Amino acid sequence: MSATLTITTDEWRYWLRSKLALAVVALFVVILVGVSALTNLRIEAEAHEREHHQEVSEETFLDQPDRHPHRMVHYGHYVFRAPMPLAIFDPGLDAITGQTLFLEGHRQNSATFSASASSADLGGLSWLTPALMYQLFAPLLVILLGHGAIVREREAGTLPALLAQGLTGRRLVAGKLLALALFVTLLLVPVLISGVIALSAGERVLAAASLLGVYLVYLLIWVALTLLVSTLAENRATAIAVLAAAWLALTLVLPAAAVNTTTQTAPLAGKIETELTMLTEIRDLGDGHDVDDSVYNDVQASLLAEYGAASIEELDINIRGVLAQKAEADLTETLNVYADRRMAAEMRQSDRVSAHGWLTPTLAVAVASRTLAGTDLFHYHRFLRQAEALRINFVQGLNRAHAEALSYTDDINRNRDEASWERARIDASNWQVLDSFQYESASASDRVAGAQWSIAMLAAWIAVLTLLLAWAGGRLKP
Amino acid sequence: MTTTVKLEADALQVYRSDKEVLSGISFSLSSSEVYALLGGNGAGKSTTLLSFLGFLPAAGGRVLVNGKDVSADHKAARAAIAYLPEAASLYEHLNAFENLRYFLQLAGRSEDSPALEAALDRVSLAPASRARRLKDYSKGMRQKVAIALAILRDTDILLLDEPTSGLDPSAIDEFHDLIRDLADTGKTILMVTHDVYGACQVADRIGLLRGGKLVGEFSAPTDGRIETETVHRAFSGRTVDTQLAV
């Protein structure tokens, strides 16, 4: 057996004979398994629940009786974003962004303009998830187990004896590194299990394997940092103090500072301010319910010319439906400008927070994890866009039916009496304009590409720490 | 028996943390010789041993192991030396056998159980205690395991740092017998100690180290041991100048 493996084996033997080490690892594993199981059950329940509600919502819409088409525009429809398969490991922003949208005519409902603070938040800090267990607490376990790996040899006086056997400092460090690397690899078994469950739910191997990879690199960063401090420290008390300070700074202080700094330096426009500006602009668009609105004079003239009619009553088409389409298109264009602007600002803010991953690997792995799991801000925006595409599609479908399946005369006379009201209803088969909604995430390769900067940050961290560790090992003296 | 120089310090000067710890000391050991470096705390005894192992660079002069400059090839020096650090630095979570196997594997050697048993027999470690972890061992028992390791390394040269520290009188006697036995088989033994009596009992020569300088050297007569009283006087500083180079 090589010297490296001999040291690795002995380190494991040391841990296995240490009641404290076993107790700490057992405690972590119990909590991790518990959190993983609970998160899995919760996400699975949410997935079934949302799937069920989506089906019920669609059935309810399609089962509506004959109605006036514009009543259906306002009747609206709910869409639900089913959790991504890897959300059982990292629910990311899902918990704070909301996964339900009410779609109706003339409005893009609240989710588009959700609380500004959410975009910059690390996400999910309010409740424990397997991802957070790895991001925050697994490093503590590595520190507790590894802080004495080298320095205890110095304290116990075994370092000179080891080096006198012809062992080099680097070989000693490599042996300890391998021991801790094997430990963190085993620690990732629950991630592997989550990945397999996600694969069975339709996730791609590339995304699941990448997620496993980034967490392995992240924990190896902590292994390298722990060993570096253990190699340079004079005693265990110093090592644990330095590592505890590093843990606090890297996992809690710097990520929080990154979020606070970003919200201060790149604030998002407030909801009220944005809506006031937008409403002013919308007022100038005209009222699609009013055929006499001068904004639509050109449309009216164009229709009369197209159909060779002298008045709107003579048109073969219901002008109210046509104007509803025009108004909805114009309104949506304006709403989309504001929505895109808002999403772009949120993404800029999110990217600025993510850039702090050069300063702390916890932020880098958190961003990479959410991106790979499809539970990040980008995917939330993707949900909003897909929901909006569905909204405008069925609203305009209903407006077309309004224009084509209901005569203008019946439409404007609908409130005269009961019979008129009945004539103003169109057949329920027109509700089939509603497409079934199923949220589609970005492809696995796109998610990996989206996480590339965070992965690069993690790679830089491990590269720098490995070099420092090699340097420290090389200068190890009795 | 042909004697060859196995260890040599030639005008060795060593600094630790910018402080001169050894100030140009010179001495040499031949095969089958037991040399005791005697000195108080901070005299430079352990520094001398670490210099032979190549852990501390020579600021001046040189150290030779088997005629080779350690600074040129410290790996060869470490391979030729079995080193017993102060306080028998072994692992408390391992038993005697596990400690021996671990260090031997790191030195690139593997010994079967009978060989380990034989080495532990030689240092008189009670068989009943050998499978117990060292956390339950006395200092003397640990020292015996460390010496067994040095025997099993089977190198020509042994460097011993305060080897009898903490041992009871009977264990010290046993240890001295063992050292003499090893020297008789051709081993070269350099030990550092502040135990004047012990050094006189076992060493062929004694070097007196004070403030990083070799201030005296004593040799045993061919038919006896070095006189304790003489060395003790020199060690306590009363007759240093008159006892040089006996």
Image (spheres, coloured by chain):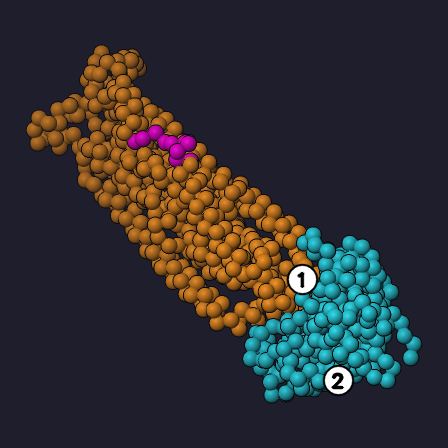
On the rendered image, what quadrant is the C terminus of chain A found in?
bottom right
Mark 2 — on which chain does it sit? B
Q: Residue at x 69, y 52 (%)?
A: B18
Give the left or right position of residue B118, taking residue A215 as reference: right
Residue A67 drawn above or below residue B31: above
Badge 1 marks a residue whose secondary structure is: loop
Q: CA distance from mark 2 to mark 1?
A: 30 Å
Mark 1 — on which chain does it sit? A
Quadrant assignment, res A415: top left
> Front-most of A474 and A340?
A474
Q: Are marks 2 and 1 in contact (CB under 8 Å)?
A: no
Tell if the residue under mark 2 belongs to the same chain as the one under mark 1. Answer: no
Mark carried by residue A478: 1
Mark carried by residue A55: none
**Amino acid bearing label 2:** Asp
**How dense is the environment of label 1, judged by Cα within 10 Å: few (below 14), some, or many (20 and up)?**
some
Quadrant assignment, res B238: bottom right
Give the left or right position of residue A240, taking residue B116 as reference: left
Which dot, 2 or 1, sits closer to the camera? 2
Magenta part of the chain: A262-271
For chain A, the rendered hue is orange
Residue A335 drawn above or below residue B4: above
Mark carried by residue B177: 2
